[in-house]
Amino acid sequence: MNEDYSFLTSATAFVVAFVAAGLLTIAFKLIYQWATPYNERTLIREGNVAAAVTLGAALLGYIFPLASALEHTVSLVEFAVWALLAGVIQIVAFTIVRQVVMRDFSDRIVRGELAAAIYMASISLGVGLLNAACMSA
């Protein structure tokens, strides 16, 4: 009987964490798309690979620290705070690249330039990995 209760408790915690992570990821995606000066949804539907690469990498760069937070936090509130921080850091990284490092970044993505997309993808993934590692320190 104790094993059934333990499984039920674990399964419930899994569902709550998975749903919370999913909702936070959707929220991040919507906020990230709002923060970009181009419309990823339209560009991706038109076959713009550069827009898909940058958005996909930003999502992964967000999900890495989200996974780390799931592993290292003890409450849903603490998890949500780490998720918020991870999202802010990703958007700040995007903003720095777009406004400081590569001022024509947005135009290059709209034109479908993969070099700019791959550069931004590497920044997003790198920031996400560092962010995840720092959460476990």
Image (tube, helix red, strand yellow):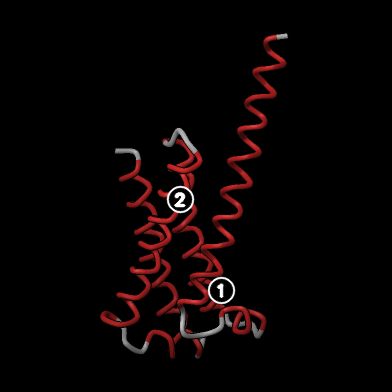
Q: Is residue 44 left or right of residue 69?
A: right
As drawn, 123 above or below 96: above
In the image, residue 97 lies at what x, y percent?
32, 76
In the image, residue 71 lies at what x, y percent?
46, 36
**Amino acid type, mark 1:** Ala
Q: Residue at x 51, y 78 (%)?
A: 50
Q: Residue at x 43, y 68 (%)?
A: 121
Q: Quadrant of the C terminus?
A: top left
In the image, residue 54 lies at what x, y percent?
48, 72
Give the CA distance from mark 2 to mark 1.
18 Å
Q: Residue at x 35, y 75 (%)?
A: 95
Secondary structure of residue under mark 2:
helix
Secondary structure of residue under mark 1:
helix
In the image, residue 75 lies at what x, y percent?
48, 36
| Residue occupied by mark 1 | 52
**Amino acid type, mark 2:** Phe
Give the residue furthest to the left: 100
| Residue occupied by mark 2 | 64
Q: Residue at x 56, y 69 (%)?
A: 30
| Nearer the observer, 83 or 129 | 83
For the residues bearing labels 2 and 1, Cβ distance under 8 angstroms: no
Q: Residues within 10 Å of mark 2 (few under 14, many from 20)?
A: many
Q: Residues within 10 Å of mark 1 (few under 14, many from 20)?
A: some
As drawn, 104 above or below 23: below
Q: Is residue 15 left or right of residue 52?
A: right
Q: Quadrant of the N terminus?
A: top right
Which marked residue is nearer to the observer: mark 2 or mark 1?
2
Give the residue furthest to the front: 77
| Nearer the observer, 81 or 60 | 81
As drawn, 98 above or below 133: below
